[in-house]
Amino acid sequence: MKNRCSWCGEDPLYVAYHDEEWGVPLKDDHALFEFLILETFQAGLSWITVLRKRENFRKAFDNFDYKKIAKYTQEKIDSLLLDAGIIRNKLKVHATITNAQAFMEVQKEFGSFSDYIWGFVDGKPIKNKTKDLSETPVNTTLSDTISTDLKERGFKFVGSTVIYAHMQATGMVNDHVMDCYRYNEV
């Protein structure tokens, strides 16, 4: 039996996410956008709630095609707000459109969103050395800095805690506990 971070418990969906995705460095803009949007919808909720709705989010939001999302009409917004398969939060739906537009502006300025966001860690993951889940922060000075910069660029629902969760999910920071089998793999 593999030793894992305690937060994933035994739910097969959570275990698969922990084993296959969480903390793996992502540099693909499409994948980074998906995680950014999923993290914004997670704000105030549990991550397992979002994971269970992830496929519905992909269908509802055109597979997270930020170019399409940036052009969503009121008719599309209304249909999203009626879609029971996703989290129907009006502010977060509107923020997704705003974030798609801001995302493309960052791409224009930096060449890619990946170059922009990974620039905050000099292109290399931060490898924390935590022994217990209780030592894992929910935000840091760096996530504060990134959050502030994103907000200045027009992004919404990107508070420091959301951004730190994004950093963990996309491998900018390795927060697997040291005795987790994934700690040295990612």
Image (cartoon, rainbow, N blue to C red):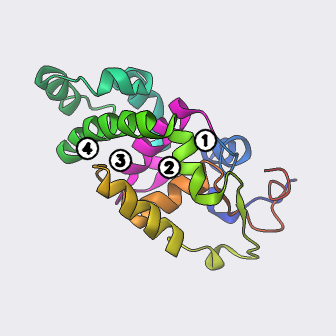
Which residue occupies the foreground of this view, 38 or 30? 30
Inspect the image, locate mark 1, and give the three-letter code of the amino acid beneath it.
Leu
Residue that extends furthest to the front in the rendered view of this protein: 109
Residue depicted at x 61% and y 41%: 13
Q: Label 1 to label 3, Cα distance in Å?
A: 18 Å
* Contact, mark 4 vs mark 1 (Cβ under 8 Å): no
Predominant secondary structure in magenta? helix
Confirm whether residue 53 shows in the render: no
Q: Label 2 to label 1, Cα distance in Å?
A: 8 Å
Question: What x and y, as percent, mark residue 59?
Answer: 39, 21
Q: Which residue is mark 1?
A: 13
Residue 33 counted in the magenta span: yes
First along the sequence among labels 2 and 1: 1
First along the sequence among labels 2 and 4: 2
* Contact, mark 2 vs mark 1 (Cβ under 8 Å): yes
Which residue occupies the foreground of this view, 153 or 39? 153
Pointer 4: residues within 10 angstroms few (<14), some, or many (20+)?
many
Q: Label 3 to label 2, Cα distance in Å?
A: 12 Å
Residue 167 counted in the magenta span: no
Pointer 3: residues within 10 angstroms few (<14), some, or many (20+)?
many
Q: Which residue is mark 3?
A: 41
Question: What x and y, as percent, mark residue 78?
Answer: 14, 27
Instruction: In the rendered structure, find residue 48 and report the number of the disc placed on it.
Output: 2
Confirm whether residue 41 shows in the render: yes
Q: Which residues are magenta?
A: 27-49
Q: Label 4 to label 1, Cα distance in Å?
A: 27 Å
